[in-house]
Image (spheres, grey):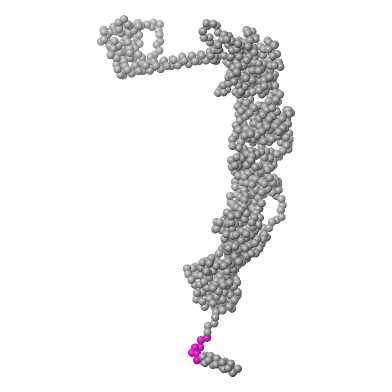
Amino acid sequence: MKSYWVFIFLLVHVFGTKTDTSTTSVDPTPTPSTIVDILSSQPQFSYFLRLLQRQGMIPLINQLENVTVLAPINSAFVGQRGIDWENNDLKRYIVNQKLRIGYLDKEESVYKTLYRVGNQNYSVSIRPDLESLEYVIDGVSSIVDQDIYAKHQYSYIQGIDHLLPIKPTLCDALMNDSNSDIALFKKIFQSLFVDPDLETEGKKKRKKKKKPKKEKPRPLPNSCEELLNGTQTIIIPNNNLLKKSLSDIQLKYYLANDDLENFATTADAITEIKYDVMELLENLMFNELIVGKNITNSKVVSKSGVQHKFSLKNRQVKVDNIVANSTIVLADGAVHIFNEDSKVFFQNINVPTVEMIARKALYGLHYSSFVEEIYFRTLDHLIDGTTSNQSIFVDIEDRDDVEEENLLMSFSSRQNLLYQFTDGTPDTSTRRHVLMNTKLCSDKKIGGCYKLKLSTSNSNKNVTVNDDVDVTDFIPIANDTTIYIATGEIKPPVNLKHALGDLISSGTIPRHLESIQIDRTSCLKTLEFINSFDLYSLDDNEKGYSIFLPCGTKNLWKDLGLVLTYLENNPNVLQKIINGMFLKNLVYSDFAAKKEIFKDINGTPIHVSSLKIKDDKNIISLNQTELALSLNSDVLFSQGVIHVVDEVLLPDNFEIPIEELIRTTFDANFPNHFIWEILKMYPNIKNAIIGKTPYSLLIPTPESLKDFNITSSFDDLLRFVDFHLIPNTEVSKILDCIDGVGYNDSIIKTNLSEGGLVCKHKPNTNKVLLQLHKLNTTVDEAAYNKDHEVRILNHGCTKQYRGDTDHLSCVFYIQKPLSLQWLENPKKDDNFLHVHLGLVSVGAGVILGLILFGGVMAGLVLCLGKRDKNDDKDDIEFPRADSGFMSVLTDEDEFIPYDRGYETDVDVLRTESDALLPIHMKRKKRIRKPDYGSTKNNNNNGTTLPRDIGDVRNTLNRERNGNGYTQF
């Protein structure tokens, strides 16, 4: 115990002695314990402290507790001049909680400052830099002085080496054009805030709409700040991911309001699109700040009420197992950008997207005026999502970008609109031609709905509507619906008269890739008959009509020959034929029934069946007549369908009495040469012609009968008639020859035993000739004799020729009669060439002779004219040396040394005053007088005189041209 007190004493003594002997009286400096004290005690923070003092923030800082000051060191201000500091700006450097670097880990953290941005506190992020082993604030400023503690305020000071830049807000980032990687999302976001002027433009309605009343929706935000009120986190898909996650039509719909400058979108469309955009955005917006470790492995509810799980993976945020590619911390929140290669982004994060019903799809394609018209016509059930499995055809000219003053309202009627909607969405990959039922129906006119033709080819790259309007695009949408964008107006069928008028004016039936040509001449003939029987106006029969119109080939009516003449002479029969082309029911080119019984407008039953479809043609039969209808070649009209065919459809029981057929050859100009009158002279022949086993006839023209003097008094008249009778067993040879198919050079027997014929068809001229072929003769046939042939001008049969001629008679109208003289053998030893010329041959010979004579005369004149010209030239260049020729020159002939003139006795008797040639070398017509002669006296002096030849007169001799010759 004693030792203890000794120790205490010594200790006190030692320390007491030291104090007493100290030579200094300065108190020790206290440790700084407030933020301002620390800043003032640390010289590296002097500039920052002075800035706080200038901004009057010292009182505020002295009142703070549990904060962290991010104090820039002096070097951070180097080069920073002209900064307009404000109080609020400096608050960005004060974090509203204690931040101790020693407690941070490797994950990013975000902290709020005292600076207010709207209704949010300004945020700063702190992330470790693993290379420099420093913590970096907002990616620009490193913490160089760590964890300086101000104990009296329970706060920390972190020295940083750079000033902190002012980050943009969420609205700043989303309402500008930076960061093109999320440009599509920004356009969708910005489309919520349409320019008021453009939105007002859309409110100009064309018509007052009749839309169903709905509950008044919540108001739309007028600004970005109003929309993002309280939002701190937004998840954003980048451009590629957005395109993959939305269908094309969905993306167009969400972006529709972004291009209002170019489209006159209606106000209803603008509003509806805005609500759908806002619904999508609210599914991607969160009120919590979700970055790094702030909220991890937790479930957060979006502003739309959908719950999502957030977590961290490799320092990246995951949302429902979708990893964000990058995170950007902004002034008042953060955005997470995703670019994961996924086509189901919205599905993976359980975000619903807009269902593309027809109305919304039309809005997305900028057909809001079209939608408005549909509502005006109370057809909204077609586009409001309640109707499925349909196709919609719209004209590109009906789009909202067409100027209203230039817009022809093609959808001006309810009927037009209904015709643009069809049942079903055809599978064009397996069917190239489809007839679709439209929504335009009429039980009164056709007993059902009108058709629309759709044709495709080249893997759906080439699509046409009604074979006349091209389709540029087709878009599948919700409810098994497809929208087709066409380059022309989709019009419902017109009436029969207009349909036929369009057909004849164009001369073609438009088809998908090629047009079917029609023969206008034949078609005009058909239309003439239809008009004459008043068939342009058909009664409504509640079934519709199918018209089989003969217009397809050339000479279609003309090829009926004498049958057409008979029909034109018998209008009642012709009317029944024309009426038979009109069926009281609908038979389209895709008709597939095996057997249906319809009636024509005569009331006659018609059995219709489809035999097969081959090479885009449907082979159908009407009773016994087969027709090939090209698929989608239908010409639609308001009461049915028209089919252009290549033949005149005659009833199966159609028959013309042979006598009536013969009467078609009657010519009123030659009434005495009518063949029927000749046949009446032979009752047996007449009865045979009209009997059960009939004959066919070769009937010459009445004019040729007159020329050949064939009358009832003609010798051998019976043989003549027999020569023109053809047994029915032989008729098929002539008919096949006329058709140009299935015939040969076989002999056609006549009723005259020794007279046979051979038929020749010349396709180049389309002429059919019958040549004589002698039978029962031992005389060798001579070479081809053109005179022994006749041309078939026309023909007609009592019934339709179907290969059987047992009960069929025909009349062949020939150019001239068959001559019995052709059958006569030439007389023995008579080798003289007998030529039998007809009137045509004589006329041709006369014309040919005149041509030859004219040619010879023209050649002669040309030769003589050329000869005179050459002779004159020779005389000028080479004067003749013959002294026997005397040149007679005039005073005017300075340049014509020789004129081939001779002085005759007549010349000698003339006085020199007589003019040998008239003035200007032109002959004048001589006027003869009663006393004319070679020795007459003429007192009329000419103006041109010969030169004086008195010196040589004595040397003239009559025989100067040679011994024994004179010029006479």
Residue 849: within the magenta? no
In the image, farthest residue toward the top: 964
Which region of the structure is painted magenta? 21-27
- Res 284 quadrant in image: bottom right
Q: Please state the horizontal and vertical placement of residue 842, each as a whole percent of the image.
A: 53, 13
- Judged left or right of residue 964, residue 527 is right
Above or below, comparing residue 99 to residue 192 in the picture: below
Q: Please state the horizontal and vertical placement of residue 84, each as a whole percent of the image.
A: 52, 68
Residue 23: within the magenta? yes
- Res 312 quadrant in image: bottom right
- Residue drawn at x 63%, y 39% is 432
- Judged left or right of residue 849, residue 264 is right
Q: Is residue 57 visible?
A: no
In the rendered image, the quadrant that contains the N terminus is bottom right
In the rendered image, the quadrant that contains the C terminus is top left
- Residue drawn at x 25%, y 10% is 951
Q: Please state the horizontal and vertical placement of residue 219, each as a whole percent of the image.
A: 67, 58
Above or below, comparing residue 677 to residue 170 in the picture: above
